[in-house]
Amino acid sequence: MGLFDKLSRRKAEAPLTPQEAVGALLYLTVAADGEISSEEKEAFIATSNQMKVFRGQSADQFNLMIDKAKFLLTEHGFETAIDRVAAALPTDLKPMAFTWAAETAFADGTVSDEESEFLTAVYMVLGMEEELALKIIEVIEIKCRG
């Protein structure tokens, strides 16, 4: 492994910032069923553009953040990736991050079994109460019907 490969790996394995954690969670959500549909990709971009946490971030910074999320998933898998996201998110950002993840999961009009299992794992690892997670899912489901 060359020096630049080692440097890239070190950067990718560094702890996530809260901003990177939110981005990683959105990426993990669209990848949860093993396939990123065009609707999910569009929702991912649209959602990211709406979020205050990404304001002021350049396209290059955003792309680096997504590369870090991809590396995290391919090198460590969903379980470790979710754990790293949860560790990086401050308590006050966890419900917001879960909400955006859930909305992203509904982007293609349905939530696959894999996406459902993913969101269940996320709310549990984030330490959210089940009742709050259910309310969030219910509201998004109603929103997506229209």
Image (tube, rainbow, N blue to C red):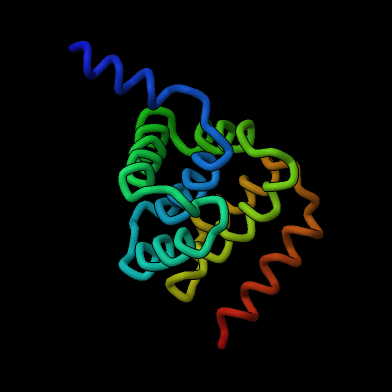
- Report the side of 47 relative to 31 (left or right): right
Q: Residue at image x 62%, y 45%?
A: 121
Quarter residue 65 falls in: top left
Q: In which quarter of the image is the C terminus?
A: bottom right
Extreme residue toward the front, this view: 56
- Report the side of 18 relative to 96 (left or right): left
Q: Quadrant of the N terminus?
A: top left
Mark count = 0
| Viewer-proximal residue among 124 and 70 | 70
Q: Tell me where residue 123 appears, x and y as whole percent.
A: 68, 49
- Report the side of 40 relative to 127 (left or right): left
Q: Residue at image x 18%, y 12%?
A: 2
Q: Is residue 77 above or below residue 62?
A: above
Q: Residue at image x 33%, y 21%?
A: 9
Q: Is residue 14 above or below residue 108?
A: above
| Viewer-proximal residue among 83 and 7 | 7
Q: Tell me where residue 78 appears, x and y as whole percent.
A: 48, 38
- Report the side of 86 relative to 25 (left or right): right
Q: In this view, does 59 lie above or below 102?
A: above
Extreme residue toward the left, this view: 2
Q: Residue at image x 35%, y 33%?
A: 71
Q: Tell me where residue 16 appears, x and y as whole percent.
A: 52, 31
| Viewer-proximal residue among 144 and 96 | 96
Q: Tell me where residue 77 appears, x and y as whole percent.
A: 44, 34
